[in-house]
Image (cartoon, grey):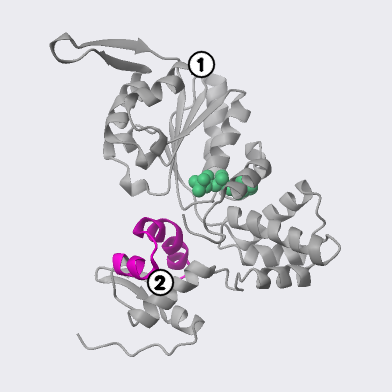
Amino acid sequence: KIIGPGGPSDDDRKRDAALRPKLLREVIGQKKVAERLQIAVDASRKLKEPLGHILFDGPPGLGKTTFATVLPNELSTTIQMTSGPALSKPADMLPFLTNLEEGSILFIDEIHRMPRVVEEFIYPAMEDFRIDIVLGEGVNARTISMTLKRFTLIGATTRGGMLSGPMRDRFKMREHLDYYTIGELAQIVGINAKKLNTPVSDGACNEIARRSRGTPRVANSLLHWARIYSAARSDGTISEPLAHEALDVKEVDADGLDKNDRRYLEVLIDVFSGGPTGVEAIGATMNISTDTLTDEIEPYLLREQFLVRSPRGRMATPKAFALLQKPFPKPRPD
Ligand code: ATP
């Protein structure tokens, strides 16, 4: 996991859990996604049928877990949570599947990291609420079929593209979460500051929002820092100048880029002359895994147009050169 505001630490996770909205109407932004989920929830209640399986994809910290955890509250049901890497063999699924209640939710985070054997094991569970368990080995092996309670599987992934086609097709709803606007993030900061009993000005909410990389988890982390900073150096309230000061000390710049975003652009521009170059080469120079670059760092740089992906590799844009105060090179004749 990367360091800095982009990667969640255990503290981040605990804080996130405490600040999570409890109901769909408390969720800020992602209006279309929330609307479709509300429709699915209303239908499930009226038809007395479990919610269809749902897949959330999008970069880290945008609310996949948040959406997954509001749904059981809306439906007055329970949720069990696990993650792809924790499910190394089909038997790892059994405690979750046997604990299901009618209409309850099973949430699998990082579902793209679930091994193929586990994936294939849960296909019948998703389709027919049934699993086939093989007992014994070789000629003595026999399969018994077990009927499950009707449940809803919610999967979350940062890499929709890595999920197998058959797995993806078994989700009735597939929802992509996108980065938040500054206005939405400012609203989240204001609400969460209230939950933390910390007075915060509108200007400070905006300042924190602007520097949050479009990501609520980052906004929470920066709010937490500003709160600590104010308690230590001021009177515990967060004014705009204080937010400014606190975030400067944390070295989060005014463009919302964190240290790793900047380093990525510095490597691309200083070492690879702005590209085109492969993501593996950038990762090797930064000593960061390619997965982290493609899942956590590049999506924001692409969206903010600091970076383009071409068939020949990653390229820094004029905006990236301007940010690092470097002259944009004239195009090279090929
Ligand atoms: P990951 O997959 O990396 O765990 P995630 O996409 O599941 O990340 P969450 O843990 O759901 O992200 O979100 C992080 C925090 O951001 C939440 O605890 C919550 O405080 C806040 N948050 C996220 N989305 C929203 C939202 N739409 N409205 C209000 N707060 C939000």
Q: Residue at x 35, y 80 (%)?
A: 271
Q: To which quarter of the image does residue 288 belong?
A: bottom left
Residue at 19% in and 15% down: 137
Which one is earlier in the sequence, the residue at label 1 or at label 2? 1
Q: Please say whether residue 86 is one of the residues in the magenta stretch.
A: no
How packed is label 2: few (under 14 Cα within 10 Å), some, or many (20 or more)?
many
The residue positioned 51% from the left and 26% from the top of the image is 105
> What's the magenta bit mostly, secondary-structure-wise?
helix
Say which residue label 2 marks: 307
Q: Is residue 296 magenta?
A: yes
66 or 173: which is nearer to us? 66
Does dot 2 land on a helix, a strand or a loop?
strand
Check the image and report above or below for 265 versus 327: above
Q: Residue 298, can we see it?
A: yes
The span picked out in magenta is 280-305
Coordinates of residue 183 in the picture (x, y in percent): 65, 60
Amino acid at the residue labelled 1: Glu
Q: In terms of depth relative to the viewer, which is nearer, 138 or 221?
A: 138
The answer to whether 327 is drawn above or below residue 40 in the figure is below
State the separation of the CA atoms marked 1 and 2: 47 Å
The residue that label 1 is drawn on is 102
> On the picture, is 226 further left or further right than 334?
right
- Identify which residue is drawn at 75% across, 67% down: 203
- The kind of secondary structure element at disc 1 is loop
Pointers 1 and 2 in contact (C-beta within 8 Å): no
Residue 313: x and y, percent?
A: 28, 70
- Whole-percent x, y for residue 312 in the image: 24, 71
